[in-house]
Structure formats: C-alpha cells, structure tokens
Amino acid sequence: MNMADMLPFLKKNPAPLPRAESALPVIAPIGADVDTRPFRVTDPHYIAMALQALADDGDLVCLYPSAGEAFLSGRITEVRPQAGELLIEVKGALAPQPEPGSVLLVSMPLGIALQFRASGRWADAAPGAPLQLVAALPDQIVHLQRRRFPRLETPLGQPFRAEFMLYGESFSMGVDDVSIGGLGLRSSAHEGRLLMPSQQLRRVRVELGHGASPLVVDLEVRSRRAFRSFLAGEQLHFGCSFMDLTPADHEALQLRLGRLDAERTRAAPPRLG
C-alpha cells in the first residue's frame, strides 16, 4: 500500500516559498485543557510521512525547548526514518546555544495543529553559524482538529451506518454520532486499520435511521481514537467532517437532526421536583 495515497494532505503543489523572517508567526502549543487523546497518532509510517510533508511544503515549526531560548522558529529540512531522526533549521538564533533537551514542536499545516515532543541536540556548527536541531523521530504525534458543531448520539435499535469503498475493499461502519458538520464512525480495530486523520472517503452511503433517505457524501477523517468495549473488544472511533455538502443534503441533514433531537427529548425521563 502506498502511504502517500492514505494522506491526501501530503500532495499539495507546489511547495510554498519560504516567508520573510519578519513574517514568521508564533504558533502556540495546544492548550493543556484540551483532551488530545482522540487525536494521537502512533503509526510510524504515518508519522514519517506527515513530517516529510512539513519538510516538503516548508511549513513553519515552532520549537519550545526545555532549556535555553523560550521560543524558536524553524523548518524541517530533512527526515531520516532509517536513522530515526529529523533535521530542523532554526531561524533567528546562532551557535552556540545551551543544549535544548526535550523539545515541544508545533506546526499548523492547512490550519490543523500538529504537535509532538522529541529529544534533540544541536548539530555541530561554528560560532555565529545558523543553528540546526537534530531531533529524534517521535513515537506519537497529535493531529488536532477541533469539533465546530454540537453532535447528537445516535439511538440504539435503528440503522445508522456508513458504507464506502477504500483500496478496492467495501466497508460498513456504525455511526455513533452526527452533527451538521460531520459524523462519528465506529469500527473494529481490524476493520479500521487503514483509516488515518486527513484521509478522504468518497461517495459514502450514510443511513440515518428509520424513515430517513440515505445520503451519499464525501467525508474527511479528522481524528482517530481507540477504546475498548466490554462486549465488542478493541474498537476505533473516527471523527469525520463532511466535504462540500450539497444544499439539498444539508437541508435533509438538518431535518433529520431536528427529528433526532425531538426523539431524544421525548425519550428523556421526566425531571423530579
């Protein structure tokens, strides 16, 4: 399998020219109050490809060393999977500098926060020369896309499913939740092994319960989270957003959400007191 096909955001053309030093923005780390567990990615091939995409496109990376400078900016210039490391050219800082130790690195490709922590050291450089950071490839990254719309959990006992083709195979996953912005899909760990954040699913047939006509939509995977079910064992949850929803589908979805909300309200137990 070609990993590049699993990561459509790696195919941006052409790579942008580096921006002027004065135009470099500050990319703040993801807030400590954000639960990043649903957005953690541990697949080593995906991690290497995502970092290579940052290098190819010249995306800005902000560095927060545990020692030395409080904040540095740079760009990944080389990813070396075989050596288990990557090389980052740091802007606006010259050798020598205190050893950085553990470094938090944050980027924002396509407006989606990508963050990881890695141990690093400065490459050998003459005094006054530009700094280059040699960092270990991380064993996990956080690929964050915040949910913009409130969601409704799907009721039990009704057909809420999403069916699609991927790499010549047919898939059928349960729909756990739905919003005007997207769906939450559930699968076994084996069935969902090919799905990764930023992957696009074309012509997904979505069933939204009794009395609702199926929708055919395009989805983009935004998050991936593993969890364990007492009955079903290891499961995966995928947060997906709609891509270019048609006005007719948008109207049908709003109508279905209104009915779901009304059904949920009727099913709720009465308040006491």
Image (spheres, rainbow, N blue to C red):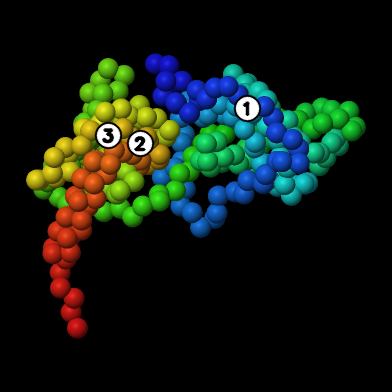
| Mark 1 vs 3, N-terminal side | 1
Where does label 1 land, which residue? Answer: 16
Label 1 vs label 2: CA separation? 24 Å
- Point 45% across, 30% down: residue: 43
Where does label 2 land, which residue? Answer: 243
Q: Quadrant of residue 198?
A: top left
Q: Element at badge 3?
A: strand
Q: Element at badge 2?
A: strand
Residue 59, percent across and down? 62, 33
| Mark 3 vs 2, N-terminal side | 3
Quarter of the picture containing the N terminus is top left
- Point 55% across, 50% down: residue: 30
Q: Quadrant of residue 239?
A: top left
Q: Nearer the viewer, residue 242 or 189?
A: 242
Is residue 266 depicted above or below 108 in this figure? below
- What is the crowding at mark 2: few (fewer than 14 residues within 10 Å), some, or many (at least 20)? some
* Pointers 1 and 3 in contact (C-beta within 8 Å): no
Q: Nearer the viewer, residue 217 or 266?
A: 217
Where does label 3 land, which residue? Answer: 217
Label 3 vs label 2: CA separation? 7 Å
